[in-house]
Image (tube, rainbow, N blue to C red):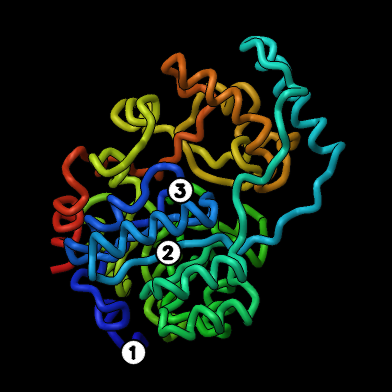
Amino acid sequence: MVMDTLQKLLGIDLPLIQAPLAGIQGHAMAIAVSNAGGLGSLPCAMLTPDALRKELELIRAGTSKPYNVNFFAHTPPTPDAKREAAWRAALAPYYREYGIDPDSIPQGAGRAPFSAEAAELLSEFKPAVVSFHFGLPEQALLDRVRSWGAKVLCSATTVAEARWLEEHGVDAIIAQGIEAGGHRGFFLTHDLSTQVGTFALLPQIVRAVRVPVIAAGGIADAAGVAAAKLLGAAGVQIGTSYMLTPEAFTSAPHRAALKGLAAEHTALTTLFTGGPARGIVNRVMRELGPLNSAAQVFPLATAAIAPLRSKAEAQGSGDFSPLWSGQNARGCTEIPSADLTRELAAGWA
C-alpha cells in the first residue's frame, strides 16, 4: 500500500520525473521540468567534480523547486588486457576504414559510480532527491545523502530487486520495464531473460512493496501516463519524449533517427558501454550484433568505440553512436520541456 503521494514525498506538483539523460541534457532541462511542476533530473555519472559543481550552481540559480541528481552505483571492473584486445580486434576493420590508429586510443571507464567525493560536493547544494541506477551505494554514502533530508530513489527491473530496495530503505522505487531507453538498471542478476515489460512489471512491484512505485519505460504520452496510474503507479518517469526538446543537446544524427522510421527498431546492445542499453539499431549494431560477446565489460567498452563515433558524427552519421531510445519514441516533440511536462502530466488528471 502506498503510504503517501509522490507529490508530497518529493515536494512536487506533478507526479512526473524527467528521466536523467546522460550525454543528452544538463541543467537547462532539469530547471525547465522542475519549474513546470515535475521533478527535473541531472545525470551525473559522466560528470567530473568540476562539471558537476557548475551544473549544480546553474540549477540552484535557475530554480527553487526540488530536483533530482542521478548516479550510477556499479562496481568498477578490474581491467582485463585480453578482453580489451579482443574488443579492439572486433573494431579493427572500422579503425582502418576511418584511418584511426588503435594505439592512439586511450583506455578509460567514462562513467564513475557514486563516491564520497560526490557526496561531499552534493552536501553543499542539498538536492531534494538523489536517485541511483544499478542498485545502491554503500550504507555510509546513503547515510551522507540522507543527512540533509534527501529522498532516495532507485531503479528496479524485477520484483526481487524491488523487494531488496525496500529492505534497504529507499523512499520510492522506479519500475523500469524492458521498453525503456538507455541502460538496464539491473543489479541482482544480469540475466536478460528476467527483464519484462513495464505494464507487466509495474502491478507486480506495486503488490510486492509498500513504498511508492514510479513507472518507467515505453510511456510517451498522456494516455500512457493514465495507463500507469490505473495499474497502481504513484507517478511516472519519462525520458525518450524529451530528447527532441530545445533544452536537449541530442546530436543531429540522433535527432534524425528519432524523427524517422529508424526509431521503430530498437534493441538492447552492449557495444557502446559494455552494459545492455536500448538504442535505435544502427550500422555497428547490425554488423557486429547488438550483444556481441567481444565487447568489453561495463563501462570499459566506451573508450575503444568513442573515436569511431566522433569520426562518423563529424560526417553527419550515427553509425557508431549510441542512439538511445525507448521502444516508444512517438512522444518525441520539439516543444519546450516545460510544455511537454504539462502535456504528459495531463494524463494523471
Q: Where is 142 relative to 133, above or below?
A: below
Q: Position of residue 53 (x, y in %)?
A: 44, 59
| Residue at the image point whose x is 14% and y is 54% from the top | 343
In the rendered image, the quadrant that contains the C terminus is: bottom left
Name the amino acid type tagged 2.
Val
Which of the two marks, 2 or 1, is nearer to us in this view? 2
Q: Which residue is mark 2?
A: 69
At horizontal 79% and vertical 36% (from top left) the residue drawn is: 84
Quarter of the view holding residue 274: top right
Could you say which disc has been placed on residue 3 in the image? 1
User: Residue 235 in the image: x percent, y percent?
Assistant: 30, 69
Q: Which residue occupies 38% across, 61% down?
A: 56
The CA distance from mark 1 to mark 3 is 32 Å
Compare residues 321 and 99 and report the one nearer the observer.
Answer: 99
SS at circle 2: strand
Q: Between marks 2 and 1, how big is the CA–CA gap?
A: 24 Å
